[in-house]
Amino acid sequence: MIESAHPFVARLPIGEPIPMPADGIPGWSTFPIEGDLRVRPLEPPVLPEPPRDGEDGPGSCRSCLHPERNVIWSDEHWRVTHLRQPSGLPLLLMLRPHGHFDLSDLPAARSAELGPLMQRVERAMLALGGIARVHVNRWGDGDAHLHYWFIARPAGMLQFRGACLAVWDDLLPPAPEQEWRANLAAVAKALAADGGTARL
Ligand SMILES: [Zn+2]
């Protein structure tokens, strides 16, 4: 548990106005919001940080307490889940181990499986057709249980390129339920073709 701030934090202009850089993100063609924006003032650090979901172990972890929730595919050690309902982009999925691990304590055997599995998920999503890229993110500020995001960017939508893709997902109208379910089923079937079980 980290109790004191890094010297980097002591140098931050906390509470002070922060000018918008001339070439800042709001000027990017991929930034989804228009208009005059201000940089939000920095708040003082909070240490120790509040616990993430599952920080204290599997007994307080939503992933461990609800292992069947939103699963579209699984094998002995891993599962792929959806996010309960359609969102703005064609498909978002998560890959996580059954075991309660974060990346830093993932057993070596599971780590060795991770690279090939990430390739399989990306290939299965690309096989839907019309998907230019699958972005893979690992944030981990909300849940202590390791989970990777796989986010599909539709081909041709150059405004969705890069790091703003997840924000676009929140802003766009949700995909039709039937189309979303068809995409989930197709990815589950493609994953199961190379092992594990489709759960849809
Ligand atoms: Zn867990």
Image (cartoon, grey):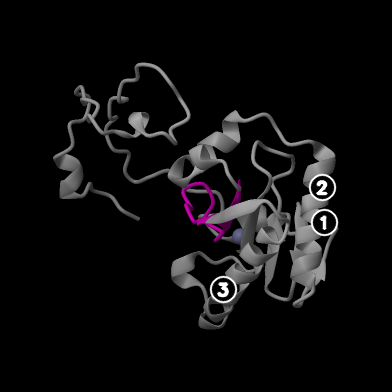
Residue 154, given in percent of the width and then of the height, sits at 62, 46
Please name the amino acid that badge 1 sits on.
Ala
Does residue 90 sit above or below 188 in this rendering? above
Q: Quadrant of the N terminus?
A: bottom left
Please name the amino acid that badge 3 sits on.
Leu
Let me know if residue 140 is in the magenta part.
Answer: yes
Write down the region rendered in magenta. Answer: 136-154
Q: Can I make out residue 61 in this image? A: no
Q: What is the number of the mark on residue 200?
A: none
Q: What is the number of the mark on residue 185?
A: 1
Residue bearing the label numbered 2: 181
Does residue 157 sit above or below 185 in this rendering? above
Q: Residue furthest front?
A: 156
Let me know if residue 174 is in the magenta part.
Answer: no
Q: What is the number of the mark on residue 114?
A: 3
Q: Residues within 10 Å of mark 3 (few under 14, many from 20)?
A: some
Residue 130, given in percent of the width and then of the height, sits at 68, 51
User: Is ligand 1 closer than 8 angstroms to the Cβ of mark 2?
Assistant: no
